[in-house]
């Protein structure tokens, strides 16, 4: 993979660096690369790689956007189980009393303790 990226970046450097007779154009990327120091070469490679990488970033962002849109659509199509619209209290969970039964038992306990 790294070799493929290197070929693409190298091709981009060479593409506009030679005239129709195959002579290097003075001041072109290839000319600056060959005549420059290590920092210049790294800068040219990084610049060309960033251009190459930007295409992948655009593709990646579009794929992520499509994934998010598909997920949102899938979630929107899922049925929602809403509780019935009634005034009845929700069913008591295991081991718990519903509020009306709890109130009745507390009242019984208070009445029983007051009678003693």
Image: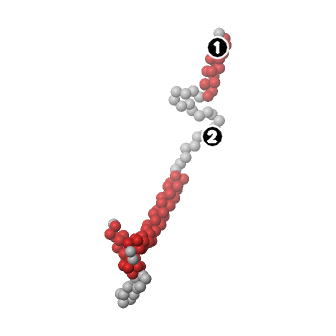
Q: Is residue 95 visible?
A: yes
SS for tag 1? Answer: helix
**Who's the residue at 39% across and 81% down the image?**
31
SS for tag 2? Answer: loop
Q: Quadrant of the C terminus?
A: top right
Residue 87 x, y percent position in the rendering:
65, 35
Residue 21 x, y percent position in the rendering:
36, 90
- 95 left or right of 23? right
- 15 left or right of 105? left
- Depth check: give the residue in front, 93 or 68: 68
**Who's the residue at 36% across and 70% down the image?**
5
- 108 left or right of 36? right
- 97 left or right of 60? right
Q: Which residue is mark 2?
A: 85
Q: Which residue is mark 1?
A: 113
**Who's the residue at 53% across and 31% down the image?**
93
Residue 40 x, y percent position in the rendering:
41, 74
Up-down relation of residue 66 to residue 19 (above or below) = above
Q: Quadrant of the N terminus?
A: bottom left
Q: Residue furthest front?
A: 37
């Amino acid at each position: 993979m790294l070799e493929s990226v290197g070929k693409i970046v190298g091709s981009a450097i060479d593409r506009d660096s030679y005239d129709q007779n195959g002579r290097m154009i003075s001041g072109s990327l290839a000319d600056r690369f060959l005549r420059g120091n290590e920092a210049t070469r790294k800068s040219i490679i990084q610049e060309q790689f960033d251009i190459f990488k930007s295409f992948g970033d655009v593709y990646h962002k579009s794929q992520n956007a499509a994934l998010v849109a598909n997920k949102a659509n899938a979630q929107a199509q899922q049925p929602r189980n809403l509780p019935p619209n009634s005034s009845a209290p929700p069913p008591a969970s295991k081991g718990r009393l519903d509020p009306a039964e709890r109130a009745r038992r507390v009242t019984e306990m208070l009445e029983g303790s007051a009678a003693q």
